[in-house]
Image: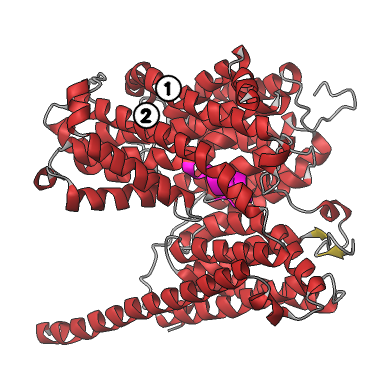
Amino acid sequence: MLASLIHPRVLTALMLLLAGAGLSISAWQGPADAMLVPRIVLTIWCAVAALVLIGECAKRLPREGGGLSPLPLLMAAVLVAAIAMASLGFLIPILPLVALTLWLFRIQRPLPLVLGTLIIGGGLWFLFHHVLLIRLPALLTSGLI
Amino acid sequence: MDVILAAAGDAFTWHALLAIVVGTWAGIIIGGLPGLGSVVGLTIFLPFTFGMDVITSMALLIGVYCGSVYGGSITAILINTPGTPQSAATTFDGYPMTQQGRVDEALGWATFASFFGGVLSCVLLIFCAPQLAKFAVNFGSVEVFALVCLAMLCIVGVSQGSTLKGLVCGMMGFFFSMVGSDPITGADRFTFGNYSLSAGLTLIPVVVGAFALSEVFVRFATRDDEAAKIPEARLRLPGLREIVRRGIELIRGSFIGSFVGALPGTGAAAAAFISYASAQKLSPRRANLGKGEPDGIIASESSNNAVTGSSFIPTLALGIPGDVVTAMMMGAMVIHGITPGVRLMADQAQTVYSLFVVLIIVNVAMLILSKPSIGLFRYLFKLPQGYVMGGIVMFSFIGAVSVRGNPLDLIVMALTGVLAYVLRRGGYPLAPLVIGMVLGPELESSLRRGLLISRGDFFAFFTHSGIASFLFVLIGLFVVWTLWSSFIQWRQHVNARADAVPSSGNRQ
């Protein structure tokens, strides 16, 4: 019983319900005029998420194969790179991220990995930042990197 | 007439034509690579448009859009794997023709049917969009509110998977659009003390995260490194006599696609299956369908490409996108200074007519570029998936940050990517999330303006005007129909389980 309740689909529905409930509290504490529509939307969100949760609990969901996957590592790397870009600029966080993506997708021989990282990461950054002049976040105030 | 000539002049500049060629060709290639599709194609090319003028940038994006819808048919025919969901019905007859050694003929019919459907829907767009825009001038706040509710319900009702899950995603999209300053009072909402959030969330980082980045995560979770074997293929376009012989099929598929495309939430995949189902009933050669009959390819390809033109009818005339791709196109239009909606035809008629001309040129370009593109697929399928995924990650970051230069958009994109992956694994459709985010501001402002007009009486909305009453009746009917069909599905499910229990008991 407990095993079926910690199924990813049940947890997803529960997460949505909790997120909606948390945001609803914030909406009901805010100014009535500005929060009129958010209150309606979040109330519907919570009600429907509760129905989805009941539906997922009632279903006999098949067990999903466990096992460690490096996917959370890729997700964390994307998030860290996104946060780091505000202070480190675009180029420095994107190079390790592209290298990690290539490595996780089994491009692991040194030469293709380095060339792929430099061409996809560095080359496209140079194209947009310096050739097309679409300014990406920069480390130096001059915008060089 | 002067406006149309000026619009044609804008579309026939060398840079617009170059953008059409590059966009269409790239769209064909991206559409043909299974799993990538139109949204990823638009994500890759959106950052390139920021330094371009309006017509050139839209020419590039429309080229990518139309090219990708056609491109999906090439791999559907060659390796029985549709590049995009829109081309899934093409595999039914396309791949059997390849197995019979008629691959050149199959590709020829797919190309010509795509071209025919695309051009016919452009003609309909040219006639229908201005008429709809003229009619929509009668819409006030209450009517717009009813229309947005109806559009959202349609999108949720026909979205893949559970209706309830679609509704949760729709509400999530509405919520995303409400983060930031309140448009009427200016009060901060859901900013949690973060000054950067006061500017609100923009559409492009959310779409890029939800579709492009989550695709990388999904691909990683379900890796398959086996390279597909592509047969030797050339393109053989059908002769005039063959086209006349199958003319009815071409026209029927194109009209079905045009009609379905103009409805919110349906999209090209639904159009292709509806058209294929009609061919199964009406084609004189229906007995051969599914065994390698060109009528099956015509039904699927003419209808899915007809959607590309007609989906612009509600987008341009009402500001209501039909699906995720048109929502993203709408976001790109707003970035380039085009605001879709009832005033667009009156305020920017020349620009709109230029887009119509561009759509027709794109379809001609698709016909011309199909031949050199097909040969490329033999080499593209040998490219390791990692390079494509690395490129998508890179373009996702560039696309998200270059819209308004706000690093917060990168975090929004990354978080949306993770959230979208979780939702996809849980069977939640993502289209309502994006459409909800597009329609959210219009829903809110029309509701609040309507309440001011009716002095806070919401029930006065139902009798505000004939159009409003009609739209609310449609909403009521749609809700009843959705509940009824859900009930029927539930009853069938319960009956199936009840039937299964005694049989499993007998085995024991």
Quarter that holds the C terminus of chain B: bottom left
Q: Amino acid at mark 2?
A: Phe
Residue B352's mark? none
Q: Residue furthest top?
A: B14
Residue B249 magenta-highlighted: no
The type of residue carrying mark 1 is Val
Residue at image point 40% right, 38% down: B305
- Give the CA separation, mark 1 to mark 2: 7 Å
Which quadrant of the view contains residue B457? bottom right
Where the N terminus of chain B falls, by quadrant? top right
- Please report the residue visible at 47 percent of the width from the left and 69 percent of the height from the top: B163
Instruction: Classify mark 2: residues with Cα within 10 Å, few (<14), some (14-19) or many (20+).
Output: many
Q: Is residue B467 above or below residue B314?
A: below
| Chain identifier of the residue bearing label 2 in the image | B
Q: Magenta segment, which residues?
A: B310-321
Which image quadrant for residue A97? top right
SS assignment for the magenta stretch, majority: helix
Residue A1 as seen in the image, left or right of residue A29: left
Relative to A124, B185 lies left or right: right
| Label total for image | 2
The residue pinned by badge 1 equals B364
First in residue order: circle 1 vs circle 2: 2
Which residue is more in the foreground, B317 or B223? B317
Q: Secondary structure at mark 2?
A: helix
| Residue on which disc 2 sits | B115
Same chain? Circles 1 and 2 = yes
